[in-house]
Image: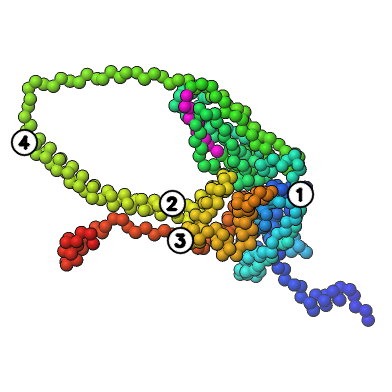
Amino acid sequence: MRLPPWIFALFLLLAFPAKAAEPFAEASVGTKGKIVIGQQVSIDVDVYVPNFFTSPPQFPLLDIANAIVTLPDERAQNLVKSVNGEEFSGIRRTYLIIPQVAGEFTLPPATVPLGYAKVPGQSTEAVVNLPSITFAVDDLPPEAQASAFSATNAELSQTLDGDPAKLKVGDTLVRTVTLFATATRAMMLPQLQFDTPDSVKLYRQSPVLADGVSGPNREQGSQRTDRVTYMMDREGTFTLPPLVVDWFDTQSMQPQRTELKSIVLTVKAGPPTTNVIPPELPKADDDSHRLSVRAVIGISLVVLALVLLVLLVRGLLPRLRRWVDARREARAQSEHTRYRQVLTALNSGDAKTAYAALNLWTKAMGFKSATEWATTSGDKTLQTALAAFERDLFGPPHSATQGSARILTSAILAWRVRNPGRNRRSATVAPALPPLNPPVGDDWQQNARNPGL
């Protein structure tokens, strides 16, 4: 007798139980169309679990050769997906990758730990593998080789704290210039060149970098803010040249230029110094009066207190000064300070200063040189980035490695994130002030006879 199909299906269902749903991950390239060097590429990674998360997925920091990779916190997104009739909860994070050379780029193997409610009321730990995904990067067109960075939009704006047409000798003019761009990171924005005539002195402050800020049209992007101060040395009319930034538009695939017009400074002589008429002083009385006894005693007490204060200050001030100097020196040579100096120097574009700062930082961590630090780390990407930077700086004439300073910056940031607290030393400064209570007994007598001990 032939069984109906539904009985046969029920038999298979009972004989072979359905496999429990498991967490999984998906990845996709969010950037569409042609991708060129320096363009920001978004990679969306979605992690799904049946039921719901009990602890969020821990997305790893990725290291890709010849590319700068970041994982912004503000790009997390909650998802819901139905698979074979079962609801899955998901979380999406977006990696931002800025390639520095042409070729193919692939996400490296990595795992994402998480927790989910496999059984209601219980938390189950799980790990999913990061999906492998590849994208291709093309060279910039020849007419865009001079572009400083790639973006979808870039704008320059500025503010002045005074009227450039109403200046006098000795006046200062503070100029704040902001470069805003979308679809890129603040670290990729170039340093602006502020050229000045000989009669105007320039004082430049450290730039301020920010990501995830709102632009003039309320779009999200990144910006670099430079603040400079001009000092007027002599009278005359002087022109500050235009500020020009060349960049590549990844939407139109055309080179673009953003510019601030020149500024004309009109400096006049300062007002002449007028003679000050001294005020009339009251005439002293012809009759002299003797000081009272109380006044004499009061003056004597004040003089005595001043003498004691001078003696106390003369004894403690040198020791206090030595203690302050020791603390300041320890702070200036600390690992954290050296680390900030390295990032600032690499961002400034001065390769020699950056390399010197890098050696000082690695020495603060206990290494003899930057080369020893890179070799000891075992980080191939870090070693390659440092070698390319040294080759551009010290090697024979050759075609410079595009973005070697930026690649080294990315490698240092990635190494520091992976190695929090590794090989760092905190400077210990011995107290320069003596103990408040002097020793007693025989030791006190010996110290009194031998002050140098």
The residue wearing badge 2 is 332
Vertical position of residue 117 compared to residue 252: above or below? below
Q: 442 or 295: nearer the eye?
A: 442
- Residue drawn at x 67%, y 43% is 149
Q: Which residues are magenta?
A: 226-234
Residue 260 appears left or right of 317: right
The residue wearing badge 4 is 293
- The disc, 4 or 1, on the residue closer to the chain's N-terminal end is 1
- The disc, 3 or 1, on the residue closer to the chain's N-terminal end is 1
Looking at the rendered structure, the kind of residue marked 3 is Arg
- Residue drawn at x 16%, y 61% is 449
Whole-angstrom CA distance, mark 2 to mark 4, is 56 Å
Whole-angstrom CA distance, mark 4 to mark 3, is 64 Å
Whole-angstrom CA distance, mark 4 to mark 1, is 97 Å
Pinpoint residue 258: horizontal percent, then vertical percent: 66, 34
Residue 138, disc: 1
Pinpoint residue 361: horizontal percent, then vertical percent: 50, 55
Whole-angstrom CA distance, mark 3 to mark 1, is 44 Å
Looking at the rendered structure, the kind of residue marked 1 is Asp
Vertical position of residue 418 compared to residue 225: above or below? below
Residue 425, disc: 3
- Secondary structure at badge 1 equals loop
